[in-house]
Amino acid sequence: MLRRWMRGSKGVQTLEWVALALVVLALIGAVTAWMNGPGGVQVAAPIQQALQRYAWCLEGAGGCPGAGGGSPFGTNPPGVRPPGVNPPGGNPPGNPPGGKPPDLGWCVTHPGDCLSNLGKWAADKWEDVKRGAGQAWEGLKSTAEGVWKWLDEHKGIVAGVVVGLAAAGLILATGGLALPVVLTALAAGGGAFLFGWLYQQSGPKPGLQGWLEAFALAGIGAVMGYLVAHGGAMLLKEVGLSGILRLFVSKGIIGGVSSGISYLILTPPDQRSWIGAGVAIGSGIITEMLAWPAAKAAVVSIAGAIEAARRKELTWQTPVRAFGQSFFLEQPGSKVYNRVFGRGVGKGLGWLSGKGISISPPNFVMRVANRVSWDVIKSKLFGM
């Protein structure tokens, strides 16, 4: 029955329709595959533009056939290019997408267009290069500004580190690597960093003046650290490690107690602090134990810088003034005053003894009273 149906006219027509449908499906598949490839772009763009123009005409926006403008549809709607015109920056026919240079094979057949498009491609690339260089420069400038801002805000610490490393390197280079040399280098570097940090705490000045003052203070700190270390090395060489404790008991305690009392007497109550009292006591102990006048004055200079930084008054003149007052006034003056005080107290006690009043104050009390009274006198006379 099937064979008889296929041999009939209806069967033949059915087979013809099935074959035609298969051919149409094959053509649709081929066209779809081609449209999805590079060639489809060239076909799809004109169709899309034509549909846009037709829709624009139907909306009453103008540009309909016969309206003039040099094309069947007159003027083009916004964003629609005339037929055959490539989009801005696009590649001509035969060129690969993605802003690549013109294809060599296409250039052989279209030399004029190739040169024109090659120039456009080079110009686009040059704009990209300039844009990238500008962005890189802005990033570099922003980074440099951030680094400079940090350095300017921490100029005291920066100056202390730079001067400290330079001072320590100079001492080590000229003195070898012996232990006293290493300790002296560390003391000089530590003094530079200490004074730079103190300046940072005191509030550095802006601009060039602040940088000059920071480096000046760091240099002064390096010198003061060197003098204290050198004086300590001289003392250690003279008395040895075993003599340090005896020196502390015989002189250091007296210096610490008298400096603490002087601090309480001479410092206004609203300006006293535990840090100030500790610095005064520590400097009194060290200055009383040291024998070298320059080392004593350096300790006084360091103590003065610490106290000035605590009061937000530290400048480069502060440690220099404290060193000069101690070296040229306090050291010679204290020797003279010791003799005057001793003779005056001795005569006074002798006069009281003649009146029948026998007083024999302990030596510790007399030495503390000597130092405290001298501190009060030099404060009233010299502002020390």
Image (cartoon, grey):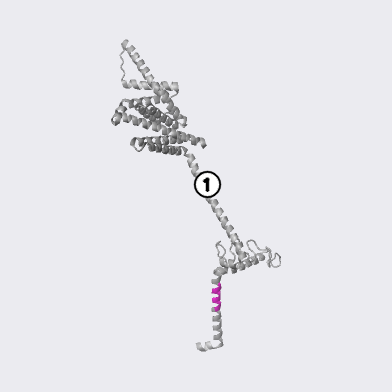
Say whether residue 26 is magenta. Answer: yes
Numbered disc total: 1
Q: Which residue is farthest left?
A: 242
Which SS class for mark 1?
A: helix
Q: Which residue is farthest top?
A: 355
Instruction: Please identify the quarter of the rendering in which residue 160 is found.
Output: top left
Name which residue lies at 56% across and 56% down. 128
Q: Amino acid at mark 1?
A: Lys
Above or below, 168 relative to 324? below
Callout 1: 10 Å neighbours few (<14), some, many (20+)? few
| Residue 355 appearing in the image | no
Q: Residue 220: x and y, percent?
A: 44, 32
Q: Residue 294: x and y, percent?
A: 39, 28
Q: Nearer the viewer, residue 15 or 226?
A: 226
Name which residue lies at 58% across and 59% down. 122
Quadrant for the C terminus in the image: top left
The residue stretch that appears in magenta: 23-31
Instruction: Please identify the quarter of the rendering in which residue 348 is found.
Output: top left
Name which residue lies at 43% across and 23% down. 379
Q: Which residue is mark 1?
A: 141
Image check: 344 left or right of 5?
left
Q: Main secondary structure of the magenta part?
A: helix
